[in-house]
């Protein structure tokens, strides 16, 4: 549904309301040069359209929340659901954002003490797949806008339909949930994390690895996929799934992912593998996977 456009009266109403949201309709109308009924009608229209909310906000320092921070987290794709869940569950974390660049998430939080801050940082650092956590204390909030200046500054630019996963890699937003599910499935397979693999997989899953991969074969059903997961875990000491390309796929698949995987096998050989994997889903679970790739490990000196 298209929201009604906001005009000059709406803008002036919001400007009067922002510093004193408890003002009466009669007084608000006088300041705007209209009747109290007109002011009330305009304000109600903005509320019903979902364009405006009025809420109470705390004064952190006066209420014992003395440590305000901006945090940044970098993690493997498969770790993102657990990372997001940990941050969103904390009552001290006020805002969590998916961002581009060096880090994957940013968050704004307030704490009653440095001890409580330290506890959540330690929780973040112990997540499997967490790479970096950086915390910056807020010394002074130089501007805290309500956002209306951005609304009324001019025309709204066209929305970007993608976000940047990593430098040079952009992912369509509609594929983000499928990418997260696929990456979590690969991570569970590589680690032979059977409970998570079962939770992410359809019972009738079909996993096919195409030649020239040395493990080429068809693994039909969850039990065969679990056996292949155990073989993968025994073969590799470390396998890191780094996405470099994502696109839609033709039925029966929903997404195709290109990835580079720095790997180290259990004989100490290290190198980088390329894979192209197509994923199909059923009821939100991975139902079909086809992998094209060549594991070409080059012998490097051990350190």
Image (tube, rainbow, N blue to C red):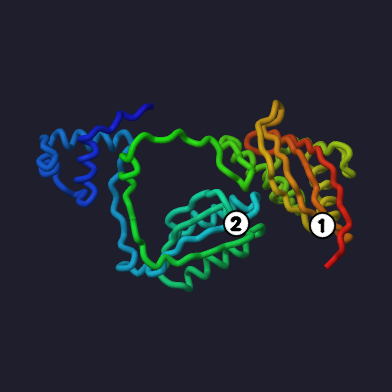
Task: State which quarter of the image contains the N terminus.
Answer: top left
Q: Which image quarter: residue 182?
A: top right
How many numbered badges does the structure rendering display?
A: 2
Identified at 64% across, 43% down, the residue is: 169
| Residue 259 location (% of width, % of height) | 73, 44
Q: Is residue 174 left or right of residue 31?
A: right
Q: Is residue 79 left or right of residue 43?
A: right
Q: Is residue 118 above or below residue 189?
A: below
The quarter of the image holding the C terminus is bottom right
Q: Secondary structure at mark 2?
A: strand
Q: Secondary structure at mark 1?
A: strand
* Residue of label 1: 264
Q: Which mark is residue 22?
A: none
Left or right? Give the position of 265 relative to 153: right
The answer to whether the residue labelled 1 contacts the one labelled 2, judged by CB atoms less than 8 Å apart, is: no
Q: Residue at x 44, y 61 (%)?
A: 109
Q: Which residue is mark 2?
A: 74
Counting other residues with Cα less than 10 Å from the Cα at mark 1, is it few (<14), some (14-19), or many (20 or more)? some
Which badge, 1 or 2, comes first in the chain's sequence? 2
Q: Residue at x 47, y 70 (%)?
A: 116
Q: Position of residue 118 (x, y in %)?
A: 52, 70
Q: Which percent across, then down, holds residue 217?
A: 87, 38
Q: Position of residue 281 (x, y in %)?
A: 67, 34
Task: Write the residue at 43% across / 72% down.
Answer: 113
Nearest the viewer among 296 and 68 is: 296
């Amino acid at each position: 549904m298209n929201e009604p456009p906001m005009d000059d009266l709406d803008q002036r109403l919001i400007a009067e309301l922002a510093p004193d949201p408890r003002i009466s309709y009669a007084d608000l109308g006088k300041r705007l040069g209209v009747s109290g009924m007109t002011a009330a009608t305009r304000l109600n229209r903005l509320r019903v359209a979902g364009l405006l909310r009025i809420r109470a906000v705390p004064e952190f320092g006066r209420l014992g929340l003395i440590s305000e921070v901006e945090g940044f987290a970098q993690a493997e794709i498969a770790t993102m659901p657990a990372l997001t869940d940990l941050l969103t569950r904390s009552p001290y974390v006020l805002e969590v954002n998916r961002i581009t660049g060096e880090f994957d998430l940013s968050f704004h939080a307030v704490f009653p003490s440095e001890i409580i801050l330290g506890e959540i940082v330690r929780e973040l650092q112990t997540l499997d797949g967490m790479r970096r956590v950086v915390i910056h204390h807020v010394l002074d909030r130089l501007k805290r806008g309500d956002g209306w200046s951005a609304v009324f500054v001019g025309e709204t630019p066209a929305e970007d339909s993608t976000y940047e996963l990593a430098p040079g890699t952009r992912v369509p937003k509609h594929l983000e949930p499928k990418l997260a599910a696929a990456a979590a499935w690969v991570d569970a397979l590589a680690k032979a994390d059977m409970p998570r693999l079962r939770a992410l997989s359809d019972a009738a899953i079909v996993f096919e690895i195409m030649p020239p991969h040395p493990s080429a074969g068809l693994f039909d059903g969850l039990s065969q996929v679990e056996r292949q997961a155990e073989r993968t875990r025994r073969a590799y000491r470390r396998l890191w799934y780094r996405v470099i390309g994502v696109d839609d796929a033709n039925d029966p698949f929903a997404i195709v992912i290109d990835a580079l995987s720095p790997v180290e096998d259990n004989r100490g050989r290290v190198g980088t593998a390329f894979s192209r994997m197509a994923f199909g889903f059923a009821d939100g679970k991975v139902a079909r996977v086809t992998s094209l790739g060549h594991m070409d490990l080059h012998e490097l000196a051990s350190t």
